[in-house]
Amino acid sequence: MPVSRSRKPKNSKQRPGPAKPAPARRPAPVRFGVVALAALLVCALVVGAVSALGGGGGGGSPTAQETPTAPQGNPAEALERRVADDPYALGDVDAPVVMLQYTDFQSAFDGVHARDTHDSIVQEYVDSGVLRIEFRQFPINGPESDAAARASWAAGQQGRFWEFYEVALGEEFHQNDGRFAEDRLPELAQQAGVEDVDRFLADMESEAATEAMTQDTNEALSLGVSATPAFLVNGQPLQGAQPLDEFRAAIDAAAEAASQD
């Protein structure tokens, strides 16, 4: 089922701050003809662990939830793609720890994570060979979310996904304020170093982009994700824009468990 290009924006806006925002709205129930077997297996294995992903991150304080205890082994291994030269991943293909990251580019909390935490995680764990980050699209906040997701994917087709990620989330903005309107996306792409803008626009509207959006969205829904950012660190869930120390604890625990397998 393709990601809708005409989904109505939410009325509420996610902003990190002391005010209590409206609860995150769960996506309407979706029934798919075929759901990936791997995702179903993972759901059965980690139903307890990933239940923490079902809410919270975009609807309250991003640091409110405690980090769960790392599970034994890596029950989410079936979801790891570990594709060499994947433009939407960072880190060694055989890194002992894989962090799946589910993101909506319009989420204020995704912006907090990108600006405050992402670079430190890359420097400490990706560059040292401990961690691999695999990005997943989960555009749930309306048409601009979908447009931004497609644009980031199209930038990745020219090897500039992570540059687009940094540019798109590099400053604070409000949902549905036109930042990710389709006529403004070529400018963001150029800021990210995308050279062929015509190809970028064609890739955004391609069937391959739709398939990529659908695959990532189905995977997130199968895990019960309803707000972003959401992460799985070797199967251990982290919800919201957690502080760096929470990621350190989860990655260190996963690396230690992996070394004993």
Image (tube, helix red, strand yellow):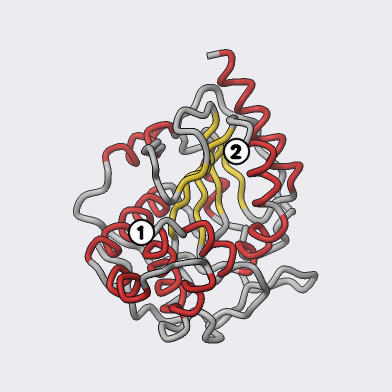
Q: Nearer the viewer, residue 44 or 195?
A: 195
Q: Nearer the viewer, residue 79 or 123?
A: 123
Q: Is residue 201 left or right of residue 149?
A: left
Residue 259 vertical position relative to residue 251 in the rendered view, above or below: above
The spot of residue 236 in percent (x, y) is 57, 36
Q: Earlier in the sequence, mark 2 or mark 1?
A: 2
* Label pair 2/1, CB-CB below 8 angstroms: no
Residue 225 vertical position relative to residue 123 in the rendered view, above or below: below
The spot of residue 68 in percent (x, y) is 65, 37
Residue furthest to the top in view is 260
The spot of residue 247 in percent (x, y) is 68, 41
> Identity of the amino acid at label 1?
Gln
Q: Which mark is residue 157?
A: 1
* SS at mark 2 in the image: helix
Q: Which mark is residue 126?
A: 2
Q: Nearer the viewer, residue 92 or 208?
A: 92
Query: Which residue is at a point 63% across and 44% down the rendered structure image?
Result: 122
Q: Quadrant of residue 93?
A: top left
Residue furthest to the right in view is 18
The spot of residue 191 in percent (x, y) is 54, 72
Q: Is residue 5 left or right of residue 206?
A: right
Residue furthest to the front in view is 195
Query: Which residue is at a point 42% across and 52% down the rendered structure image?
Result: 220
Residue 158 vertical position relative to residue 88 in the rendered view, above or below: below
Query: Which residue is at a point 53% across and 26% down the rendered structure image?
Result: 96
Crowding near the residue tagged with mark 2, few <14, some 14–19, many ≥20 C-alpha atoms within 10 Å: many
Query: Which residue is at a point 22% across and 65% down the rendered structure image?
Result: 207
Distance, label 2 to label 1, CA atoms, is 22 Å
Which image quarter holds the N terminus? bottom left
